[in-house]
Image (cartoon, rainbow, N blue to C red):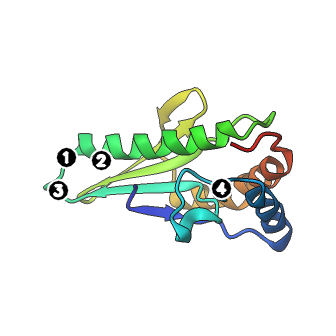
Amino acid sequence: MVDYALLFLPDDGVQSRIDALLVRQKHRTIKQTVYEALRTRPAPVFIETKASTGTVASSHVQLAIWTVAWQERLRAMATHRKLITAPVFQVYGNVWQVLFAVDNGHEMVSLPLAVVAKSVEKDFRDWISGFSSDVTTIP
């Protein structure tokens, strides 16, 4: 599990579509975990932290496993939409690194947090709304 996830709080219309999607599922979760605090809320941003005594490699592995599991969970719900690019943060001591998990790999890009917030507010809102409406297969 990652240390932090920035949750997306959808408006009533989007939440209704997500809820309709959840009731059709065995585990009733929008992501790869059934942890109650995360189960019904999309989390488009993940943060893994390590103190300076930890290792960057273990942080990167944890973040990668979590993100790939999230992508696989979404991919299992058949839709015509490509998975959205997700910003993930790796924090090691006082150094923050922003990575972007894309459907065909990953790339490293540095952007201000305000740009990420704007992306979540507009792009993720539109994407999760469409995704939750388009799902044709529930694992």
Which residue is disc 2 drawn over? Answer: 59
- The residue wearing badge 1 is 55
| 3D distance between C-alphas at marks 4 and 1 | 30 Å
User: Foreground mark, 4 or 1?
Assistant: 4
* Labelled pair 1, 2 in contact (Cβ < 8 Å): yes
Q: Is residue 46 left or right of residue 60?
A: right
Q: Residues within 10 Å of mark 3 (few under 14, many from 20)?
A: few
Residue beneath the point at 59% across and 54% down: 44
4 left or right of 45 in image = left
- As drawn, the label of residue 35 is none
Residue 52: give its label: 3
Q: CA distance from mark 3 to mark 1?
A: 7 Å
In the rendered view, tell whether residue 79 sits above or below residue 8: above
Q: Position of residue 102 (x, y in %)?
A: 58, 35
SS at circle 1 = loop
Q: Position of residue 1 (x, y in %)?
A: 40, 55
Label 3's element? loop
N-terminal of the two: label 4 or label 1?
A: 4
The three-letter amino acid code for the residue at tag 2 is: Ser
Residue at which label 4 appears = 30
Q: Nearer the viewer, residue 40 or 111?
A: 40
- Give the residue at x 26% y 60%: 94
Q: Amino acid at mark 3?
A: Ser
- Label 1 Cα neighbours within 10 Å, binned few <14 / some 14-19 / many ≥20: few
Tell whether 106 sits left or right of 58: right
Mark 1 and mark 2: Cα distance apart in space: 6 Å
- Decide: is 75 above or below 13: above
Which amino acid is tagged 1?
Answer: Thr
